[in-house]
Image (cartoon, rainbow, N blue to C red):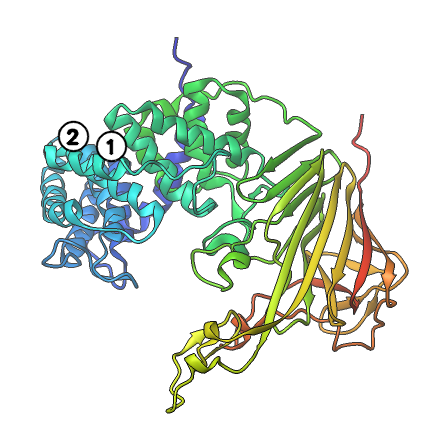
Amino acid sequence: MPSPLDHEFVRAAADAADRSAAPAAARPDEEPAGVTHRALARWVKTLVAAYRSPDSALHGSGRAVAAAMTQLRALRAAQTATGLFAGGDNVQSPPDSAFTVNDVCDAHLLAAGAGPELREVTAALAEIAGAATGALLTGGVHTPNHRWELCAALARLHRSFPDGRLLDRVDAWLAEGVDIDAEGLYSERSAVYASHVSNPSLLLLADVLGRTDLRDAVERNLTATLDLIRPDGTVETVHSRRQDQHHPFPLAPYLPHYRLLAIRTGRGDLSRAARLAAAGGIDDPDLLAQTLLTPDLCRMLPAPAPEPLPRGRYLGTAGLASHASATAHSVLYGGSDVPDHRRIRSGLACNPTFLRLFAGDAVLDAVRLSRGFFDLGPFRAAGLRQLADHRYRLTETLTAAYYQPLPPGRRRDDGAYRMADEGRFSAAMAFPDRPRDEVSHTTRVEAELREDGADLRIDISGPRVPWALELTFRPGGEPEGAVPIGDGRWCLTTGPMTYRVGADEIRVEAAVEAGEPLAGPDRSDVLRYDPGQDHTVVGGTDATSGNRVYIGGLGPSTLTVALRARRPSPAV
């Protein structure tokens, strides 16, 4: 027996759609200026959904229909002779156009058969979809998630305008296999693209094609994401290979996927995540159309399962570990792509943050370690190894070289040697042909994730070079026990410090086991974050912002750092 309808959810979805659609409906003849093709298609879809929904203030509104036609004329004008849409940095892009065609096809499904009032809208949508079909049928992609967005567009086109060639093309893309690993993470490890592209696309394909394996892939990703939800209601992104690796990402975009699969599977843990995703209110104007297209979304959620505490999770494929308790939530990361690729690049996981710690309102957003070694940048572990329950080791070895004269057989009379990149510098010196004198530097971090925080043991070996451990706290408090050194920065030496926000606090104690004493607040040359030459050569940085506490010195060194979270006991 299906669960009853959740009228409160549907009304909230309708309200979100109305907030987006009402301005256009109020001025239905006003031509949109400077609006992207993707935004135009989303407005049309939202206007048609609002017209169709009895819960919308625009239900049956002629002004909504007129506004949709105005947006459709602008959308058709943005469509080039190839059928692709103009605009954006990806020129003549089939996948970028697929985003728009997905909304066009959804709007067409909503408008078709809805009555004579939407006949002109339906015809305009069919014309736009038809013009784009050829380019999407033969077009290519340039990111992993593009494949599934393009497949979703082809499947939607087939749903409204059946054509076997469309399904053949979808089969060709899907035959590559969905890029989801054993832990349930997509290859880009990105919350943005999982929630906005891969999950919704695969769910659509599962429904249109009857492919339960695609739905299962989404369920696996949502299950993995459960352990990536942070206490502040965001999803962990430090391990991402895309733009979100340096920014927090809200859980809200996951709402329709958690909700749909919770309803279809009865899973209480997915229901808990769906409720959490909606906790800040519903503000997605597209949800109303989704409720009309996928009626299961409108049903009541199953009872949520309580969050299991304490708990830990080790995602070996991403080099990520987390531990959560009622007192603290910690995240340890050692899965950077930089050690293998030796460069900073779009599409690589480059974030040098290796630890976060949440203690209620007191948040340690980032722990990073700089070393003054050939300007090769901060510590980015080449992997995360689990030693025991909640105990891990992160290791990185950096190597630079000085080069000897070329062997006689490799010399040229004209001195014109080929340009080569030796890992930190490029020059016309034929580096691979020269004998090398190598200099190495190894950093090893052993971490124990505890119910009340984390213990770190940091071993820095190699030549005598400066190092600095940077602890970036989220604004809202001030370090007590550390020495201010200006510009939102503090220095910690031998004494403990506490970062307190309200009744929540994080206490830090550091001690040197081997090596020189810690640097004092006068050592500005040591107590700093160095992003490395890949950033500085173009005048850039990936530095954090917030209240930054530095612990520094000259290596070789062995340092222990104890991080302890303290929170008031919950009322009984």
Camera-side residue: 268 or 64? 268
In the picture as drawn, the residue positioned furthest to the front comes out as 408
Q: Position of residue 4 (x, y in %)?
A: 41, 15
Q: Hey, which quadrant is residue 462 in on the image?
A: bottom right
Which comes before the other along the chain, label 1 or label 2?
A: 1
Give the side of residue 283 with respect to residue 119, left or right. Answer: right
Find numbered disc 2 in the image and state the secondary structure of the residue it sits on. Answer: loop
Q: Position of residue 151 (x, y in %)?
A: 25, 39
Camera-side residue: 137 or 47? 137
Q: Position of residue 511 (x, y in %)?
A: 87, 57
In the displayed structure, 385 sits above or below 5; it is: below
Which residue is drawn at the image coordinates 78% and 67% (left, top)?
555
Specify the amino acid type for callout 1: Arg
Q: Which residue is mark 2?
A: 114
* CA–CA distance in space, label 1 to label 2: 8 Å
Label 1 close to label 2 by CB (< 8 Å):
yes
Give the side of residue 542 with respect to residue 444, left or right. Answer: left
Tell me the quarter of the image containing the C terminus: top right
Camera-side residue: 29 or 80? 80
Give the side of residue 334 with respect to residue 258, left or right. Answer: right
| Residue neighbourhood size for the residue with mark 2, other residues' Cα within 10 Å, grouped as few (<14), some (14–19), many (≥20) | some
**Which label belongs to residue 52?**
1
Specify the amino acid type for callout 2: Ala
Q: Hey, which quadrant is residue 436 in on the image?
A: bottom right
**Which label belongs to residue 285?**
none
Q: Is residue 321 visible?
A: yes
